[in-house]
Image (tube, rainbow, N blue to C red):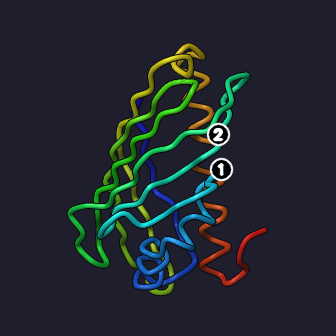
Amino acid sequence: MKVGGVRELPAAREKVWSVLMDPATLSRCLPGCEKLEPEGEHSYRATLKIGIAAIKGSYSGKIQMANLDPPHSYQLTVEGKGSAGFVRGTAQISLTEHGERTDMEYSGDIQVGGLIASVGQRMLQGMSTTLLHQFFTSLERELMGDGPR
């Protein structure tokens, strides 16, 4: 499944980059994130609790950032598995500054398997859209200094 888009964020690129590189802030922004622990440079062990339709579960896995070009771009790799199946994905993230605002462009590919894959492409696409919206809403709050809600 392909994902992609552009989101305008209410901060300068340097601040957006700083927030995206901070594990504590990132864990507050990731939907369902219960734990995000460093496991090397730009690599983290994560535990997420996410539900898609009637299939809900905890996933443990790894989040890694590579090909960093501060504060312009990086590649994000996510791998996780749980009782409902597995999720693997890669995305390219790029930040373009427009004064005090920054466009965050993302494009990637996600693969799912196991029981979670049985919900169908349309349901998975809808859930990924929902999770991205939750992530960006939390990220915007962090950037504006409002913190978690």
Classify 10 Å Cα crowding around label 1: few (below 14), some (14-19), many (20 and above). Answer: some
* Front residue (pair 61, 110): 61
x, y (%) of residue 54?
73, 22
Left or right of 45: which side holds 43? left
Label whose residue precedes the other's in the sequence (1 or 2):
1
Label 1 to label 2, Cα distance in Å? 6 Å
Task: Tell me if 66 is positioned left or right of 53 in this view.
Answer: left
Judge whether 118 appears above or below 139 on screen. above
Give the percent coordinates (x, y) of residue 76: 34, 54
Where residue 123 sits, quadrant-wise, is: top right
**Residue 39 percent location from the top left of the image:** 36, 63
Residue depicted at x 73% and y 80%: 146
The C terminus - image quarter: bottom right
Tag 1 secondary structure: loop
What amino acid is at disc 1? Answer: Gly
Asked which quadrant contains residue 71, the reply is bottom left
Report the residue at 56% width, 22% height from top.
116
Residue that mark 2 sits on: 50
Question: Residue drawn 55% across and 17% down?
Answer: 115
Tag 2, which secondary structure?
Answer: strand
* Residue 65 image offset from top left, x and y in percent: 32, 61
Residues at discs 1 and 2 in contact (Cβ within 8 Å): yes
Which quarter of the rendering shows the N terminus?
top left
| Amino acid at circle 2 | Ile
* Residue at point 66%, 62% (across, down): 137
Q: Nearer the viewer, residue 31 or 127?
A: 31
| Residue named by callout 1 | 32
Category of crowding for the residue at label 2, using alpha-carbon neighbours closer than 10 angstroms: few (below 14), some (14–19), many (at least 20): some
Front one among 39 and 115: 39
Could you say which is closer to the camera, residue 101 or residue 3?
Answer: 3
